[in-house]
Image: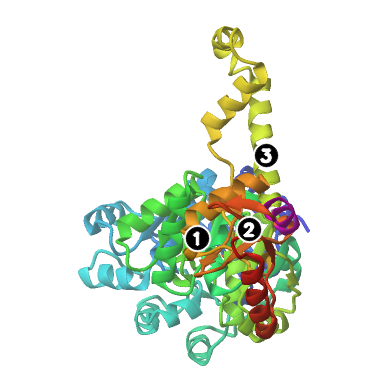
Amino acid sequence: MRFEDFNLDTEILKAIADMGFEEPTAIQELVIPKIMQGKDIIGQALTGTGKTAAFGIPILQRCKNEEKPFALILEPTRELAMQVSQELNKLGKYKRCQALPIYGGKSIEMQIRALQKGVDIVVGTPGRVIDHLERGTLSLDTVKFLVLDEADEMLNMGFIEDVERIINQTPTHRQTMLFSATMPQPIVDISKKHLKNPERIRANTKDVVVPKISQVFYEVKDKDKINALIRLLDVEDPELAIVFCHTKKEVDDVALHLQETGFNAAALHGDFTQAHRDEVMSKFKAGKLDILVATDVAARGLDIQNVSHVINFSIPHNPDSYIHRIGRTARAGKSGIAITFVRPQEYKTLRLIEKTAKTRIDKKSLPSERDVFEAKSRSIIRDVEEIITSEGHKLYLPLVKEMAERNSLFDIAAAALFSAYGDIKTVSTDKEADYVRLFMTIGKKDKIHVGDIVRNVAKEANIPPNKIGKIDVMDKFTFIEVPQDLADKVIRSVDEMIMSGRKVRIEKAKEKPEEAISQVKKGNKKGKRQ
Ligand code: ADP
Ligand code: MG
């Protein structure tokens, strides 16, 4: 089906083409003709399936720039009010049909002035609409279309009485559309009371959203989550990512950690002022911010283009919330990746989500340090080659010539990369399994300290000191953890080396306590000073 088949004004078709919509989404195909026939409808579809245009297009089709306002759209949050209003203004631009968002937190005087001039469509949050009704700065007598968007959210946010008060101030001969992801009883009641013979429309949502989203999970313990996140962000290199957390505190912690690691990240939750939230959102939308760390509530219903990754830092307890969250990616026909961190005790929740969302979430293992290194290297190579193609580097050529008299070109290039990118070492996720414990026959009695051991072992085995894990220096011996793949190398090079004036033996530590005891005894003997 094509938009041309709906019998729409050329002005609207032109605007649709400008927006880059190629064909109607499933819900639009079902809803647009019904609304054009004058029917009341109840629409159920996942986020990101194009519901705004589904009601917006037929409403705009009837816009005559006469009755002001001729349509009222209620939204649960100010962000949604702004977003829907923007979308309607784009769709209505050639018809010169104007939508105005009204919501709390913004100067009411400006809104009053705009309402006085007259707008075609009011898109508002229930609280602010009531406010204007009480002040007499908004009248709903001319309203022909009423849309209750995200009705279940308005219910969750305690707006339902306000919504009913508003409905009661609109003419009874209006046409009413209700959209809701779920249909809890109070919403069913409202629709029975205020909609006339509504037609219930459910788009086959699975076909629309889920196939474009690749869904994976990683098993991660709590303490490893932040490092796992950093590694994934390094390897995946998302265009825009939203990281979902359970609590505001978790949002703050994760955002801070990411900022400290050098990511361009910001936190979004209900404790921030409206002005701050607006600023964060507009930066994110403009791509000036790469990562948004948010609670469910803060990110609800937001339509942000180009979100390539949704990361559930904490698995949502409720499957609907999972569906909502992952609906933030793969918008408008793009593909996306949804990543979920699952703690070992959370497999049940994961299975429930899979069952409810009728989807499969595949397990993956976290990228290794090597993977991170390779990903970073590839991105550096891309950057450099892009610069060479665009010839932006040419003004530095005389400088290179000068340096080349004293240094090799390899050194110059590598030093330049170092100055641009710094150290590309990676964070270590202290995954215990990757480390082995070694036993060394030297201890405090030999006047040796942790620092000496790190230095000596790193030097002798020729490995970076930061690869060495936990070290326990006991009186007569020491346990030292090294990465599994380096263990043999460390043993080979360190065994029999002289430290603190004596020959040191090193071997893998015994796992079983009784063997370890005999190892210690044996070690003491072997280690005896000659
Ligand atoms: P919903 O209200 O169902 O969550 P939106 O109305 O916010 O979804 O639409 C999600 C995104 O999809 C918006 O960016 C919108 O511009 C875009 N969109 C809507 N309809 C189409 C279409 N037919 N083709 C491509 N993109 C569309
Ligand atoms: Mg919507």
As for residue 68 lying within the magenta part, the answer is no
Tell me which label, 3 or 1, sits earlier in the chain.
Answer: 3
Asked if the magenta segment contains residue 491, the reply would be yes
Residue 441 vertical position relative to residue 513 in the rendered view, above or below: above
Which is more toward the observer, 444 or 290?
444
Which quadrant: the C terminus?
Answer: bottom right
Residue 263 placement (x, y as % from top left)? 49, 49
**Circle 2 residue:** 504
Q: Is residue 335 left or right of residue 228?
A: right
Q: Nearer the viewer, residue 318 or 108?
A: 318
State which mark lies toward you, 2 or 3: 2
Q: Which residue type does callout 1 highlight?
A: Asp
Mark 2 neighbour class, 10 Å CA radius: few under 14, some 14 to 19, many 20 or more: many
Residue 296 on image: x %, y %? 49, 71
Residue pointed to by mark 3: 377
Quarter containing ligand 1?
Answer: bottom right
- State which tag comes first along the sequence, 2 or 1: 1
Residue stretch rendered in magenta on the structure: 487-495
Looking at the image, residue 479 sits to the left or right of residue 137; the answer is right
Q: Which residue is most to the right? A: 1
Instruction: Residue 220 in the image: state x and y as whole percent.
Output: 62, 71
What residue do we see at 61% from left, 14% from top? 407
Q: Which residue is mark 1?
A: 446
Q: Quadrant of residue 78?
A: bottom left
Q: Amino acid at mark 3?
A: Ser
